[in-house]
Image (spheres, rainbow, N blue to C red):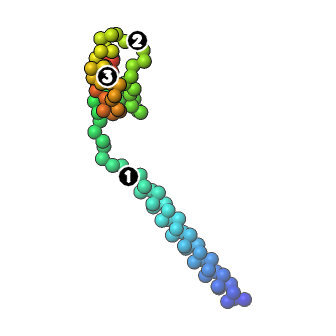
Amino acid sequence: MNTAFSRVFRSTVATASVALLLAAGVAHSTGTRQIEGPALPQSAAEEAFPDAAFGVDHMVTGPTSPEFKRQQADAGCDQAIWPDVPLTCYPKR
């Protein structure tokens, strides 16, 4: 009976050791997964509106003057794609 207990004990210890190593490897890989890269340069619109976390819509939906509408048309605001939107597309604050 002593031999059977020894075999069970060794296999249990071996299984526990493998499980512990596997858990340590998983913890290490998840701990190093989020590596911060270099900061991307900000566009002029991102610098002008830093409080807009998800970008700024350059299409004004409120009332605007005919002069501002001409300014937007001259700047090509309807074709602009974020983040490369000229500051002339935004109304003055």
Tag 2: amino acid: Pro
Mark with earlier residue (3, 1): 1
Q: Are marks 3 and 2 in contact (CB under 8 Å)?
A: no
Disc nearest the viewer among 1 and 2: 2
Residue underneath mark 2 = 63
Mark with earlier residue (3, 2): 2
- Packing grade of label 1 (10 A; few <14, some 14-19, many >=20) is few
Residue underneath mark 1 = 35
Tag 3: amino acid: Cys
18 sits to left or right of 64: right
Q: CA distance from mark 3 to mark 1?
A: 35 Å
Q: Nearer the viewer, residue 48 or 31?
A: 48
Q: Quadrant of the N terminus?
A: bottom right
- Packing grade of label 2 (10 A; few <14, some 14-19, many >=20) is few
Q: Are marks 3 and 1 in contact (CB under 8 Å)?
A: no
What is the x, y in percent for residue 15? 59, 75
Tag 1: amino acid: Ile
Disc nearest the viewer among 3 and 1: 3
What is the x, y in percent for residue 71? 28, 17
Quadrant of residue 6 in the image? Answer: bottom right
Mark with earlier residue (1, 2): 1
Instruction: Please tell me whether mark 3 sits on a helix, a strand or a loop.
Output: helix
What is the x, y in percent for residue 18? 54, 73
- Packing grade of label 3 (10 A; few <14, some 14-19, many >=20) is many
Residue underneath mark 3 = 89
Instruction: Please tell me whether mark 1 sits on a helix, a strand or a loop.
Output: loop
